[in-house]
């Protein structure tokens, strides 16, 4: 006999579990979540690091969760999820003092709702800034903005919150754009490096574009990104979407969702690791915990990666060809851009530096206020030749060039630091987790933080060891130990490159959220629409469940519109 019975149970307590849990419970299904870690939320987390009084986001940093349908429907602002919107957005500072300093083209005009208005002034300013490097770069920027406003933005929003069953036999919303846009169709089939050269004339903007891809996708220039990331990254690089800062840190998302979940009657359990999904006659019947407790359920949802999701039901319950296709994702790649391996593309050094004072940049007095600030030299040839990726994969980290992105959330959220102190988050790419033993990863805290300060000092002279209070650097080893779903130590879990997005995610045979046994579903980022906080995976999964079970409740949609009618992107 089972020890307890629920209508629905969720394996894992990541942020997609906390989303779909709310929907399932509101639909009338008594729902419980089971998480192995001591805290719910997965990548939507925060820790008191690097010192007491400081708050660090050890995983997700740039979020726009206010654009998710659940934000309005469950009144998450009332549960403590409050966003503020910086004046500045995306920037790059070059060693010679030249820079790009963007303000959101779709600027938020209502901080309560996230409503946007198209800013002609900010758009014109960005076009002029890109044009300082080459006239063609300005022309391309204007072309992207026109297309983005006319069709791309709306298509991206609809694509994010729909799935293969919605698309039927026709193209999805993004692929439908290709029919009357041959230039976009050409770009969609290129590698990231080829796109950079096709789009931009100046090496500065080529560098900017390629590095932006790494931030959002974890993909290097030699890889294809697919149409989804092409549109997404251009939108970020050109400051089309507004920057947003969650007050209190990213864990405010998880806390708000859990409060809402409990208020509608849901239950969650931390330190409760699920060992197995119970299957009888091809149907999921519940779960067994690692302590032997059995929980019966009519519906089981997995917030794990696809490999773990199938492990939970066992090879005996999975068709052989599907098992073999998914098993390839776990193999160690034989080369840098092995298309079969699945967990190597989003590995970073990601750290919090506690500082006595904020950076004082010599190029612009407000540069320290930018929430997404890149700094580094123009190095297009270095990136295009794959030397950057090669150096990282052969030595663990790039030594010739540092291409970092920093975030100054303390400037907009005073809860992040003690009074009179400051913090900067910073990211730089590194090798996958398997590259070094644990002892080596643990030694990188001092090495990486000193490297960052040495480079940063070139742009802001006060960013030196005298200014540093403490640093905490999250490595792929930290990621693997914290979140077992991210098997290669990358923040994105299953890679989302050009052949693993849309209908092909996680594989074609499992792209509709239904797993090989009845009443067993996948809601995590390994399903469409991929990694990043607030993607549509769990929303789409619930809609599939509601259809299969004939549930009367349907989640509300959401369209944030400004003076130019369009839907918002999510992060990263």
Image: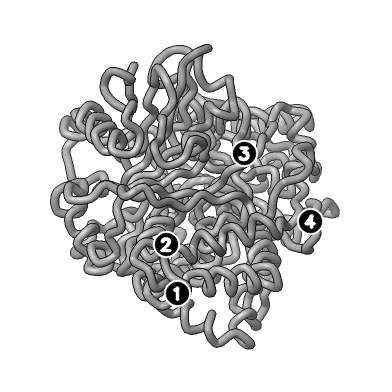
Q: Earlier in the sequence, mark 3 or mark 4?
A: 3
Say which quarter of the image contains residue 440.
top left
Query: Callout 2: helix, strand or loop?
Result: helix
Query: Gap between marks 3 and 4, in whole Å?
Result: 18 Å
Residue 114, numbered circle: none
Q: Give left or right: position of 249 versus 58.
A: right
Q: Residue 318 falls in which quadrant of the image?
A: bottom left
Picture layout, residue 186 above or below residue 43: below
Residue 331 place in picture, x, y as percent: 26, 58
Category of crowding for the residue at label 1, using alpha-carbon neighbours closer than 10 angstroms: few (below 14), some (14–19), many (at least 20): some
Q: Secondary structure at mark 1?
A: helix
Residue on which disc 1 sits: 199
* Chain-order first, disc 4 or disc 2: 2
Q: Is residue 434 left or right of residue 373?
A: left
- Give whichever of discs 4 and 1 has the lower sequence position: 1
Q: Is residue 220 visible?
A: yes
- Residue 562 is marked as 4
Q: Residues within 10 Å of mark 3 (few under 14, many from 20)?
A: many
Q: Secondary structure at mark 3?
A: loop
């Amino acid at each position: 006999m089972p020890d307890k019975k629920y209508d629905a149970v969720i394996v894992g307590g990541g942020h997609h579990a906390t989303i779909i849990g709310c929907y399932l419970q509101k639909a009338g299904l008594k729902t419980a979540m089971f998480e192995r870690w001591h805290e719910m939320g997965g990548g939507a987390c925060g820790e008191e690091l690097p010192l007491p009084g400081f708050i660090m986001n050890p995983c997700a940093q740039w979020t726009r969760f206010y654009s998710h349908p659940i934000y309005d429907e469950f009144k998450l602002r009332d549960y403590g999820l409050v966003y503020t919107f910086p004046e500045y957005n995306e920037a790059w500072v070059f060693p010679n003092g030249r820079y790009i300093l963007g303000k959101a083209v779709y600027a938020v005009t209502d901080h309560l709702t996230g409503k946007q208005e198209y800013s002609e002034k900010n758009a014109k300013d960005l076009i002029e800034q890109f044009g300082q490097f080459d006239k063609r770069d300005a022309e391309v920027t204007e072309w992207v903005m026109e297309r983005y406003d006319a069709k791309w933005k709306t298509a991206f929003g609809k694509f994010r919150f729909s799935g293969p069953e919605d698309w039927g036999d026709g193209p999805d919303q993004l692929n439908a754009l290709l029919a009357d846009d041959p230039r976009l169709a050409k770009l969609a089939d290129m590698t990231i490096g080829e796109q950079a050269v096709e789009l931009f004339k100046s090496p500065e903007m080529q560098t900017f574009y390629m590095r932006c891809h790494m931030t959002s996708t974890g993909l290097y220039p030699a890889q294809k990104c697919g149409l989804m990331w092409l549109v997404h990254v251009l939108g970020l690089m050109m400051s089309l979407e507004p920057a947003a800062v969650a007050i209190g840190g990213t864990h405010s998302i998880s806390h708000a969702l859990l409060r809402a979940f409990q208020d509608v009657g849901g239950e969650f359990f931390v330190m409760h690791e699920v060992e197995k999904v119970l299957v009888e006659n091809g149907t999921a019947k519940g779960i067994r915990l690692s302590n032997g407790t059995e929980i019966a359920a009519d519906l089981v949802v997995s917030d794990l990666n696809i490999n773990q999701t199938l492990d939970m039901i066992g090879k005996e319950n999975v068709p052989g060809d599907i098992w073999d296709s998914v098993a390839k994702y776990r193999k160690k790649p034989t080369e840098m851009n092995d298309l079969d391996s699945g967990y190597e593309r989003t590995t970073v050094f990601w750290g919090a530096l506690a500082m006595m004072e904020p950076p004082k940049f010599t190029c612009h007095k407000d540069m320290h206020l930018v929430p997404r600030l890149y700094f580094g030299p123009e190095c297009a040839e270095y990136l295009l030749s794959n030397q950057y990726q090669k150096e990282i994969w052969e030595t663990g980290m790039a030594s010739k060039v540092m291409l970092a992105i920093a975030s100054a959330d303390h400037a907009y959220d005073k809860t992040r630091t003690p009074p009179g102190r400051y913090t900067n988050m910073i990211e730089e790419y590194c090798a996958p987790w398997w590259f070094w033993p644990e002892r080596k990863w643990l030694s990188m805290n001092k090495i990486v933080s000193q490297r960052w300060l040495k480079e940063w000092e070139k742009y802001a002279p006060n960013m030196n060891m005298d200014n540093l209070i403490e640093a905490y650097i999250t490595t792929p080893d930290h990621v693997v130990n914290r979140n077992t779903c991210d098997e290669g130590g990358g923040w994105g879990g299953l890679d989302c490159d050009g052949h693993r997005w849309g209908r092909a995610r996680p594989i074609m045979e499992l792209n509709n959220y239904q797993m090989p046994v009845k009443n067993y579903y996948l809601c995590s980022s390994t399903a469409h629409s991929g990694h990043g906080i607030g993607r549509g995976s769990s929303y789409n999964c619930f809609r599939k469940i509601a259809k299969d079970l004939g549930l009367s409740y349907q989640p509300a949609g959401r369209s944030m519109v400004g003076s130019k009618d369009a839907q918002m992107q999510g992060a990263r």
